[in-house]
Amino acid sequence: MKFIIDDANVEAIKNLYEFFPVEGVTTNPSILAKAKKHPYEVLGEIREIIGADADLHVQVVSKKAEDMVREAKVICEKLGQNTYVKVPTTREGLKAMKALSKEGIKITATAIYTPMQAYLAGKAGADYAAPYVNRIDNLGANGVEAAKKIHDIFKNNGLKTEVLAASFKNSQQVLELCEYGIGAATIAPDVIEGLIKNASVTSAVEAFTSDFEGLCGKGKTMENC
Ligand code: G3P
């Protein structure tokens, strides 16, 4: 499962790229609004950090299919080859996906709350479909189960579309989808940090250091003991 950063904070992205095995960035209009910069300025900075080969997902804002298609082309022109255009999975969005896939533009179908939306997006040519796991949970349904079902629907119907699960609030939601072999997950920086935070690990590592320093002296390691 690919881990992707769901954020547009340049410092947070740099930091996560240094420490975690992440492979791209997703944004949406609300995420871009939080960055408080011109959208193409911040997206250009993100592209610089992640490199030309990494996946960058950028959402169209237009409502009508024809406008979405024009907007998608501008996004790709400005941000390069490995840019996925996120298209909300509405009636107009499906029309735009059909047109964009014919032109070879990479598509992430977004705002997915139901497996049927995902199936239609797959048939319309989307490369990824993004179910909103936690938001589905908040509606009283099961977001993890919905993402698994979508994965199965794609595999059982021979569609090339992969699940790009989104909207996570905790490690357990992510882990359950890793276990299932979902294609990708896009995760906010605080949830990515939470994937490795564990007081027992911290205390085990501290005990190793203190025992070794008891043997060889403060600051000593296997390099300089
Ligand atoms: O792009 C969709 C995803 O970012 C939604 O996440 O945390 O706003 O539910 P969230």
Image: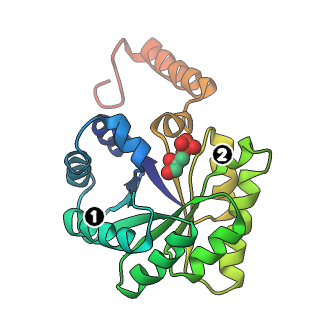
The image's colour scheme reads: rainbow
Separation (CA) of disc 1 from disc 2: 27 Å
The residue at 30%/31% (across/down) is: 223
- Image coords of residue 178 (percent x, y): 63, 57
Q: Which mark is residue 33?
A: none
The amino acid at mark 1 is Ile
Q: In the rendered structure, which disc, 1 or 2, sits on the residue that comes first in sequence?
A: 1
Q: Position of residue 163 (x, y in %)?
A: 58, 66
The residue positioned 34% from the left and 45% from the top of the image is: 17
Visible in this render: residue 85? yes
For the residue with label 2, is its CB less than 8 Å from the closest atom of ligand 1? Answer: yes
Q: Is residue 49 above or below residue 213?
A: below
When the figure is inspected, residue 103 is found, relative to residue 148, above or below; the finding is below
In the image: residue 74, left or right of residue 136: left
SS state under label 1: helix
Helix, strand or loop for disc 2? helix
Q: Position of residue 154 (x, y in %)?
A: 65, 77
Callout 2 environment at 10 Å: few (<14), some (14 to 19), or many (20+)?
some
Relative to residue 168, is residue 82 drawn left or right? Answer: left
The residue carrying mark 2 is 135
Q: Amino acid at mark 2?
A: Arg
Which quarter of the image is occupied by the N terminus? bottom right
Q: Residues within 10 Å of mark 1 (few under 14, many from 20)?
A: many
Quickly name the residue at label 1. 75
Q: Is residue 161 left or right of residue 53?
A: right
